[in-house]
Amino acid sequence: MVISVLENMAYEFSGFEDKFWPMAREIWDGVLPRSLQQRVTLRLIEKTKENMEGWYSPLPRLALAIIGPYAAKGETPERTAFKICRDLFYGELKAFPAFYAKDPERAKTFLPNNVRYDAAASELVHRYSFGEEDRTDLNALEIAAEALAAEAMPSPDALEKHESA
């Protein structure tokens, strides 16, 4: 149900200026530190993979607005549910430059209004509500897959087997 609410909210979602921004943040912040985090993260990754294949799901658009740039300034080194989700999400977004090269107009529809893509630099440019910008270079992004695999994110198959038992 949480995923359905987020997906429905994400259609036409414009980022921090959207009327649903406070509700989106409240749901996101309430889910990630809780037991639903793995399910929501897995669904987000599934929908992001679909986006990079050209299928449209609004969920990654909302997630990109909420998660923001890859490494925020002043970030602590400790691993959190948010950082694991962000790493998995950006691991999939590394395919965005290739998707953009194939169909730039369609790729732009996958971005919230506060994010634009700089194709020359392969960077996602996030604009904050206070006007400053932060960039994520998708080609230079290094996310250690081994670290993510060790952080107990079950596969979708494992979740389905658990649910059917």
Image (spheres, grey):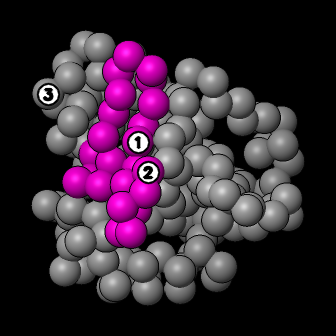
- What amino acid does circle 2 point to? Glu
Give the mark toward the camera: 2 or 3: 2
Q: Nearer the viewer, residue 50 or 156?
A: 50
Q: Which comes before the other along the chain, label 2 or label 1?
A: 1
Task: Tell whether position 132 is magenta.
Answer: yes
What is the x, y in percent for residue 67? 50, 60
Instruction: Mark yes or no: residue 35 visible.
Output: no
What is the x, y in percent for residue 148? 77, 45
- What amino acid does circle 3 point to? Glu
Q: Nearer the viewer, residue 151 or 63?
A: 63
Numbered range of the magenta stretch: 111-133
Q: Nearer the viewer, residue 86 or 139?
A: 139
- Outermost residue on the front side: it is 131
Tell me the residue at 85%/59% (across/down): 77
Q: Quadrant of the N terminus?
A: bottom left
Tell me the residue at 30%/77% (across/down): 21
Task: Tell whether position 99 is magenta.
Answer: no
Q: Which residue is mark 2?
A: 133
* Drawn side of residue 13 relative to residue 153, left or right: left
* Drawn side of residue 103 relative to residue 82, left or right: left
Give the mark toward the camera: 1 or 3: 1
Instruction: Mark yes or no: residue 134 visible.
Output: yes
Find residue 59 and report its image quarter.
Answer: bottom left
Q: Secondary structure at mark 3?
A: helix
Question: Which dot marks residue 105?
Answer: 3
In the displayed structure, would residue 148 be above or below residue 101?
Answer: below
Query: Tags 1 and 3 in contact by the CB under 8 Å rule?
Result: no
Query: Tags 2 and 1 in contact by the CB under 8 Å rule?
Result: yes
In the displayed structure, would residue 61 be above or below residue 18?
Answer: above
Q: Which residue is mark 1?
A: 125
